[in-house]
Amino acid sequence: MKFLPLSDLLQKQYNKLVTHPLQSYEWGTFREKTGLKVIREGKFDNTNLVDGFTMTLHKVPKTIWSIGYVPKGVFPDKKMLDELRKIGKREKCIFIQLEPNVLFSKEYQDILETLPLKKAAHPLFTKYTFLLDLTKSEDELLKMFHPKTRYNIKVAQKYNVSVSEKNTDEAFTTYLNLMKETTKRQKFYAHSLSYHTAQWQTLKHTASSNELSSHLLIANYNMKTLAAWVLFVFKDTLYYPYGASSSEHRETMASTLMMWEAIKFGKKLGLKKFDMWGALGPEPDQLDPWFGFHRFKQGFRPSHVEFIGSYDLVINPLLYQLYVVSDKLRSLLLQIK
């Protein structure tokens, strides 16, 4: 077994092996357009590609150092960690963060304790998410939903809120405007508009051969857009990574209808699962700023699943300790701000 750089010719083979959009070949192409260095390597058994990973390199401002990131990849073994360590030294990484797309189990937890990894100082992905079974019928799904969720869907329908897929640049501009409004209103930090634009231009649903595609759903009321969501389709799963909404006409419950229409959209495509892209833990703090969003998703009665979590492969121990301290100070300052 050996690791080698991947060429574009192996894109389809590679995509068959990975299990999440953030490890897809197309995602790496998008991240290159945002200015990041992307490293793709395959694990080969003789000439057969049997595994692989995509890693992005994130420069630490005003230094020669970087941080590596392998989101939603495979469960690491010693060979993979040895290869990542070699890359990390070559690319002047302080550490490489791994967030395997692997559900929690005692077996995996025991193996992790034998590997040279630390629990991540600053995880980027939540350890939990909500998964909805799209193989159930619409009637079965509706019966599962919380009564308040079913009621809010009916409210939106009575207001004649309409939801449609609009994969146009004009609709995307509307989404960007709503995103600016949403982040300002809810006071959270989000990706830049240039990030979203590069993502859309690279992944938007067209007649191209992309195996990862991005779709835009728009909810309108009286000729005004109240919500806009970006959805990903990869293999048999629908993902909800980004959403934006207006502060106007909240009484119409447009976002609840949007979620229901997204579910029906996934079913129409013949997908099997809907990953709602993150959740709080099993006993969430009601004061957590994300609690309302968690509760909103929970109303659709998806399964609450736990992953094994985020881990750091430390390349430079001294700089890693400095990074951990400075990151805590930075987070504190952002909270105060």
Image (cartoon, helix red, strand yellow):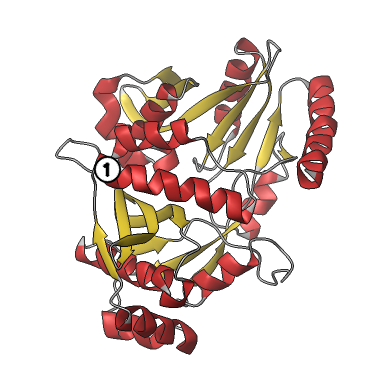
Please rate how many residues cluster around mark 1, counting C-alpha atoms within 10 Å: few if below 14, some from 14 to 19, many from 20: few
For the residue pair 173 and 15, the one nearer the viewer reads as 173
* Looking at the image, residue 246 lies above or below residue 292: above
How far from the left and from the top, in percent, is residue 86?
60, 16
> Height in image: 281 above or below 188?
below
Would you say residue 68 is visible in this rendering? Answer: yes
The amino acid sitting under disc 1 is: Glu
Nearest the eye: 97 or 245: 245
Asked if residue 233 lies left or right of residue 289, the reply is: left
- Foreground: 120 or 265? 265
The answer to whether residue 238 is above or below residue 191 is below
Decide if residue 193 is on the left or right side of residue 185.
left
Residue 158 found in image quarter: bottom left
- Between residue 9 and residue 125, name the one nearer to us: 125
Tell me the quarter of the image containing the N terminus. top left
Q: Residue at x 24, y 22 (%)?
A: 9
Q: Position of residue 197 (x, y in %)?
A: 38, 34
In the figure, residue 267 lies in which quadrant? bottom left
Of the 4 image quadrants, the one containing the C terminus is top right
**SS assignment at label 1:** helix
Q: Is 289 placed above or below 83 here? A: below
Where is residue 49? Give x, y as percent.
34, 29
Judged left or right of residue 246, residue 326 is right
Residue 2 seen: no
Q: How many labels does the image show?
A: 1
Res 105 → quadrant: bottom right
Q: Residue at x 39, y 41 (%)?
A: 18
Apparent side of residue 35 relative to residue 157 in the rendered image (left or right): right
Residue at which label 1 appears = 170
**Residue appearing at x 38%, y 55% in the figure:** 229
Whole-percent x and y of residue 313? 68, 31
